[in-house]
Image (spheres, rainbow, N blue to C red):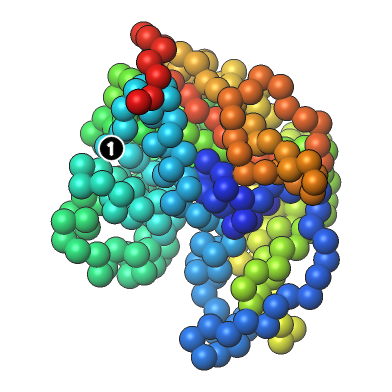
């Protein structure tokens, strides 16, 4: 279900998976730069990054997967639906050889990320980041080794044929040995109209599964933020998606031209019953209430099974 900032996951240490709904507890009253967090003085993009993203672990997962699958590290990355392009910034910071391209349609969120993440970077790092206000379906970029579409962003393509076209555009934009990284969520509670709360540093993150249509698979989800003073930032973000299953996604990747795709499934902490933040290749998952999985698709089949050094 909704991702949290407590999981050591491939796509971040971002996300303690919601195998079980978290226990209700009082939100902490934490200070931020000398003021209490309230709806009036908080920024929705900052709260989103705090609640949903952890790009360091996301990039760690990309590096680990490249070592395992290709016996080396990648240097070029494109972040589709990049939003504030925080992952691009982390990728460029990581190594002097790394270059990142971010693609998003929303000019306002791109400018927010420019001010927040990239404006004060040293020139040797900032010069290796390119942000494009463009449509992922039509954008033209140099071939890259890695493309990522995280936080279920591609679920916006509700028509199967459209999503296949997007996957084909990704395939065409990858280098011959390139890898595509994306994520998906599901479980019995993913089909329910429920709210899930998670209490963070001075605010409560609310994942609101507002509507689900079992005939079409359409979902309407909101993110709300609630604060200790009783104020609320309601519908800070809204997502009208189609909830795709893992077999559907793998079928569409294959149809788009990818040689293979691998599901990375999260293990279980047997004491808590929650996800343990460790994702491994798997062909069998648990029928739990909520899960998050990661999918890695290979443009070309591996010639050898080289092991990481």
Q: Is residue 281 above or below residue 91?
A: above
Could you tell me if residue 248 is visible in this image? no
**Image coords of residue 180 (percent x, y):** 44, 30
- Image quadrant in which you'd find residue 136: top left
Could you tell me if residue 45 is visible in this image? yes
Residue located beneath label 1 in the image = 76
Among all residues in the image, which is located at the extreme bottom?
34
**Image coords of residue 31 (percent x, y):** 58, 85
Query: What residue sits 81% from the left and 37% below the top?
Result: 288
Q: Is residue 257 left or right of residue 73?
A: right
Number of marks drawn: 1
Q: Is residue 143 above or below residue 284?
A: below
Query: What residue sits 55% from the left and 79% below the top?
Result: 42
Query: What residue sits 71% from the left and 82% below the top?
Result: 228
Q: Is residue 101 left or right of residue 165?
A: left
Element class at badge 1: strand
Q: Is residue 211 above or below residue 30?
A: above
On-image quarter of the C terminus: top left
Q: Nearer the viewer, residue 134 or 46?
A: 46
- Image quadrant in which you'd find residue 203: bottom right
Q: Nearer the viewer, residue 216 or 168?
A: 168
Query: What residue sits 43% from the left and 34% below the top?
Result: 64
**Image coords of residue 176 (percent x, y):** 30, 19
Q: Nearer the viewer, residue 218 or 91?
A: 91
**Image coords of residue 70 (percent x, y):** 36, 22
- Image quadrant in which you'd find residue 137: top left
Among all residues in the image, which is located at the extreme top?
303
Q: Is residue 288 above or below residue 193?
A: above
Q: Residues within 10 Å of mark 1 (few under 14, many from 20)?
A: many
Q: Is residue 237 left or right of residue 221?
A: left
């Amino acid at each position: 279900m909704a991702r949290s900032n407590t999981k050591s996951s491939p796509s971040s240490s971002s996300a303690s998976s919601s195998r079980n709904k978290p226990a209700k507890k009082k939100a902490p009253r934490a200070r931020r730069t000398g003021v209490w967090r309230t709806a009036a003085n908080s920024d929705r993009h900052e709260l989103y990054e705090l609640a949903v993203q952890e790009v360091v672990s996301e990039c760690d997962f990309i590096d680990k997967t490249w070592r395992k699958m290709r016996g080396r590290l990648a240097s070029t990355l494109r972040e589709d639906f990049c939003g504030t392009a925080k992952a691009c910034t982390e990728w460029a910071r990581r190594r002097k050889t790394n270059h990142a391209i971010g693609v998003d349609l929303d000019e306002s969120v791109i400018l927010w990320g420019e001010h927040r993440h990239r404006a004060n970077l040293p020139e040797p790092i900032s010069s290796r980041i390119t942000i494009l206000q463009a449509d992922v379906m039509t954008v033209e970029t140099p071939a890259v080794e890695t493309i990522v579409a995280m936080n279920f962003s591609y679920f916006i393509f509700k028509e199967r044929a459209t999503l296949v076209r997007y996957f084909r555009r990704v395939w065409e934009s990858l280098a011959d040995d390139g890898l595509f990284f994306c994520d998906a969520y599901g479980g019995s509670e993913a089909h329910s109209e429920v709210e899930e709360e998670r209490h963070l540093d001075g605010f409560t993150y609310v994942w609101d599964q507002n509507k689900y249509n079992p005939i079409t698979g359409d979902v309407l989800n909101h993110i709300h933020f609630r604060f200790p003073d009783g104020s609320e930032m309601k519908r800070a973000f809204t997502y009208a998606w189609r909830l795709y299953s893992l077999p559907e996604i793998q079928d569409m990747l294959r149809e788009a031209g990818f040689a293979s795709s691998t599901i990375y499934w999260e293990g279980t902490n047997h004491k808590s019953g929650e996800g343990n933040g460790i994702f491994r290749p798997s062909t069998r998952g648990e029928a739990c209430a909520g899960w998050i999985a990661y999918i890695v698709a290979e443009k070309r089949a591996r010639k050898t099974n080289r092991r990481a050094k």
